[in-house]
Image (cartoon, rainbow, N blue to C red):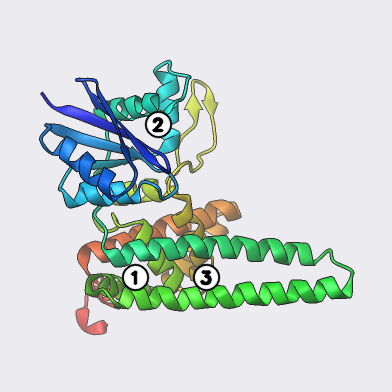
Amino acid sequence: MLSFCGIDVSKDRLDVMVLPEGHRSSVPNDVAGWAELVEQLRDCSIAAIGIEASGGYERGAMRALLAADLPVRQVNPFKLRQFARASGVLAKSDPLDARMIASFVATMPTRPAPRQARAAERLTEMLAVRRQLSAEKVAAENASRLLEDAMLQRLSRRRIARLAADIDVLDQRLVEIVATDVALAHRYRLLTSMPGVGSVLACTLIALLPELGRLSRKQVAALVGVAPYAFDSGALKGRRCIWGGRANVRQVLYMAAMSASNWNPVLKAFHDRLAAAGKLPKVVIVAVMRKMITMLNAMVRDDLAWAERRCSRHIVPTAC
């Protein structure tokens, strides 16, 4: 009989539940606890081990489990809470959450957690800090427009300049980290070969979308959150809209799509055609985002740079 394990993560402790046996345990969230957890689960016939994303506190346990070749699944907290409510479970506690995670991975389809290179993990950490600094810079710029005192204006300009300098340092560091890994450097060159894809988007896709190149066009669009969903019921014909997906990837892709709509000849023609057809501006830019990510997915899948892929689509190869 196959078993399913749920692990609820907190700063100091891991609460573990194995179903259907109902075995419950708790281990420290440190190196010794991770080793103990691996020993507990190694001899069990575990089909899937679910871990809820907990702001980074789950990283050490996931690394230890993946290193032991155990089947880890990272569970989306929003989906888990909806699953618990649908199951009639409204209470929340660490042991109960561990049980719900085990039930979730036993019931719902989940993807295996990817085993990332150490360089990719460092990219993820750098990108998280970069998002924080970017948000702080935007807030500071917005607040500075209302300042009237000269001293406050100088302090605000100094703060904005410092944040911009820190962001530039992080951007340089992202490229340096990618260069330390041969496989990541190759993927970086493929992605940045597309006009409109800069270093930030390329590093974001490498770190936060490791499935790129292994999914279908519909799957990658849904995973990023740029796939339109129907809202029709009976006589109601609602508008299509996007929902869910990885917001951190989608936000960076949005800015890249704005640039690509001006500087990438293929995507600019696509953008202009939709705009001429009377599509709303937001509909147009989401369509560009979707086309952009599906093209990047195909480039990684086929291991072809932008120019090589464009040439391979021509009838006469010598024209390239």
Q: Which residue is at a point 34% across and 70% down the rendered structure image?
A: 191
Kindly identify which residue carries mark 1: 191
- Which tag, 2 or 1, sits closer to the chain's start? 2
Amino acid at the residue labelled 1: Leu
Q: How many marks?
A: 3
Crowd tier of the residue under label 1, counting other residues whose Cα lies within 10 Å: few below 14, some 14–19, many 20 or above = many
Which residue appears at 43% of the width and 18% of the height? 89
Q: What is the three-letter code of the residue carrying label 2? A: Leu
Q: Residues within 10 Å of mark 2 (few under 14, many from 20)?
A: some
Residue 208, horizontal then vertical, whole percent: 37, 57
Residue corresponding to mark 3: 259
Mark 3 near mark 2, Cβ–Cβ under 8 Å?
no
Quickly name the residue at label 2.
80
Name the kind of residue labelled 3 in the image: Ser
Is residue 6 something one can see in this rendering? yes
Along the viewing direction, whichever of 290 and 6 lies nearer the viewer: 6
Q: Earlier in the sequence, mark 1 or mark 3?
A: 1
Q: Earlier in the sequence, mark 3 or mark 2?
A: 2
